[in-house]
Image (spheres, rainbow, N blue to C red):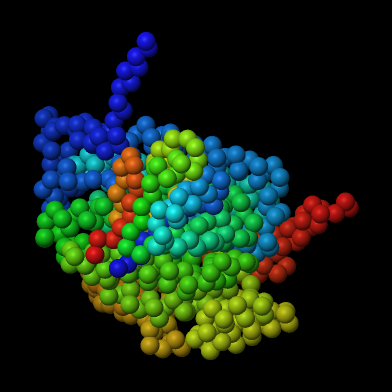
Amino acid sequence: MSKVFIAFQRNEDTRPIIEAVLADNPHAEAIESPAMVKIDAEGSLVIKRESIEELIGRSFDLQELQMSLITISGHLDEDDDQFKLSWLN
Amino acid sequence: MDMHATKKKLGIKEKYAHMTRGLDWETSYQPMDKVFPQATFEGIKIHDWDKWEDPFRLTMDSYWKYQAEKERKLYAVLDAFAQNNGHLGLTDARYLNAIKLFLTGISPLEYVAHRGFAAAGRNFPGVGPRVACLMQSVDEMRHAQTQIHALSNYNKHYDGFHDFKHMLERVWYLSVPKSFFDDAFSAGPFEYMIAIGFSFEYVLTNLLFVPFMSGAAYNGDMATVTFGFSAQSDEARHMTLGLECIKFMLEQDPDNLPIVQKWIDKWAWRGVRVLTLVAMMMDYMLPKRVMSWKEAWEIYFEQNGGALFADLARYGITMPECLKQCSIDKEHIGHQAWATFYQYGGAAAFHTWMPSDDEMDWLSAKYPNTFDKYYRARFTHWRDEAEKGNRFYSNTLPMLCQVCQIPMLFTEPDDPTTICYRESDYDGEKYHTCSDGCKHIFDNEPQKYIQAWLPVHQIYQGNCFPEGTDPTVEGFDPLAKVLEWYHFDNGHDNLDFEGSRDQANFAAWRGMATKNT
Ligand SMILES: [Fe+2]
Ligand SMILES: [Fe+2]
């Protein structure tokens, strides 16, 4: 299985997002570098709207991720509830 | 009792479907193939444009909302950076040279990308890709503008930032990135999408933006990090478009596979060659380094690109043959490029220098197989000579590769002590290329590449002097005249960092910022 990844700018908006992603994807690993955090995960990675909303205490639109996204790897599938990256092989 | 009958909002899938499925029409005054004249000549067969799906499912209202928010954040940072003399917080004034190269070599390409995606969007008969290309085209315009705005602050204080557009169209090393985009833009819309959307954005852009922007953060350049990450936040969408495009072409018709494979092979190599400039920036031009070029290549190409090609194998796509050479090249190209710019430092609009002992130790640690063995002695010699007052500048002009337009500086894959030359004959003339990859590209489309505007050839033909220059006068100095034609401020923009006006000003201003005298 190959790794997918997603990288975010490191700021106050992404802190709870990263926390939620790591909690929802126990197989994922966060790698920090100056001003950014890259999250690698074997096979696939899911970002859930509800988990982020629980942490920030307001409703969250997954398209807000676009504000601080740096890069992704893998096939993306996004709907109103989740943002999923995966390799199909 | 108050009853709230809130209308249920559409989900993003439905909104996207409405925008990309319901708004198009078949033309009646003109036949469709006249309205979309570029849709078929490349040989790509599309049977059902509705099979196109944008995984981000971004609609225009959200697009404008999020992009406006990104701009507000970016300009707040740029203002703060300028108001607080942010440039004095840089690690070292040598860093500025990396962003001079960025402004002159990369930002103008954002503008060309804007034009390229506008043209591709215009030429696709399907609404899905047309909308995606439209958004990317607007993004690329934004990237060009924000980069120019951000870097214009540096133009107030330092040399080499003053005339990037004029330089792009003339200067020898800037023809490398310029010709790369011109090559893509002059292809058909499908090839353009494989060239820029897939090969560049998906496979290679991480190597440019991620380590470089992180490097800018490390070196205290808040303005560059901010525009870099702001541009990069659009990049995830661009990468997705590139990947979607290739899947779409491959799923539409089995006849598309060999055409797409040929384009991937070509554009992967074209892109890799352009990134030589980035290798050099990462290993030599950032005073504080985040990672070496080799490490960046391993993470973003070998692992990530490996995963991608493993995934595309189900369509019959294979990893381009030429990329195998990159696992050898990754240990050499940064050093070879920097050695070349050091020697031609008289003809570059940024400063060059030899690394300090500490930096050489870093390079040996990062390149244990090559740095000490092939480069350290030469670099130490140049540095010693410079200290004695004999800074070496080459006064000849290098031969350029007919395809990538990089000087012939690369070595044979199996012998790092021999420069690699390849030769092709076409129509009674000889053409030279830097590698098997570039030779292969030339041999496939000689009619295209014989038209290349090669700066060195042009100089020798006398086409690169200011109007009215008389090369026959006593004491004619061709290099000085070329630099004048480039709009270089000879003696300030070029030459060694040691002794430069940037070096002196930065030291003086930083002194003023920290002391009361
Ligand atoms: Fe861009
Ligand atoms: Fe080449």
Give the side of residue B372 with respect to residue B53, left or right. Answer: right
* Residue B446 position by quadrant: bottom left
Query: Quarter-wise, where is residue B94 in the image?
Result: bottom right
Q: Residue furthest right?
A: B517
Residue furthest to the front in view is B1
* Quadrant assignment for the N terminus of chain B: top left
Pinpoint residue B220: horizontal percent, then vertical percent: 64, 56
To which quarter of the image does residue B121 belong?
Answer: top left
Outermost residue, top side: B1
Is residue B239 shown to the viewer in this render? Answer: no
Q: What residue do we see at 70% from left, 60% from top? A: B502
- Estimate the x, y position of residue B187 in percent, counting from the top left: 26, 55
Asked whether B39 or B258 is in front, the reply is B258
Up-down relation of residue A49 to residue B485 (above or below): above
Residue B362 location, x and y as percent? Answer: 60, 77
Task: Judge whether B475 appears above or below B360 on screen.
Answer: above
Q: Using residue B238 as the reference point, say whether residue B249 is left or right of it.
A: left
Q: Is residue B87 left or right of residue A20?
A: right
Res B258 visible? yes
Between B182 and A22, the one nearer to me in the picture: A22
The percent position of residue B92, horizontal first and vertical second, equals 68, 63
Count all numbered tags in the image, as a single digit: 0
Q: Residue at the spot x=62%, y=79% of the render? A: B360
Residue nearest the observer in this picture, A70 or A88: A88
- At 36% from the left and 52% from the top, the residue drawn is A46
- Image height check: is B220 above or below B145? below
| Residue at x 69% of width, y 42% of height | B83
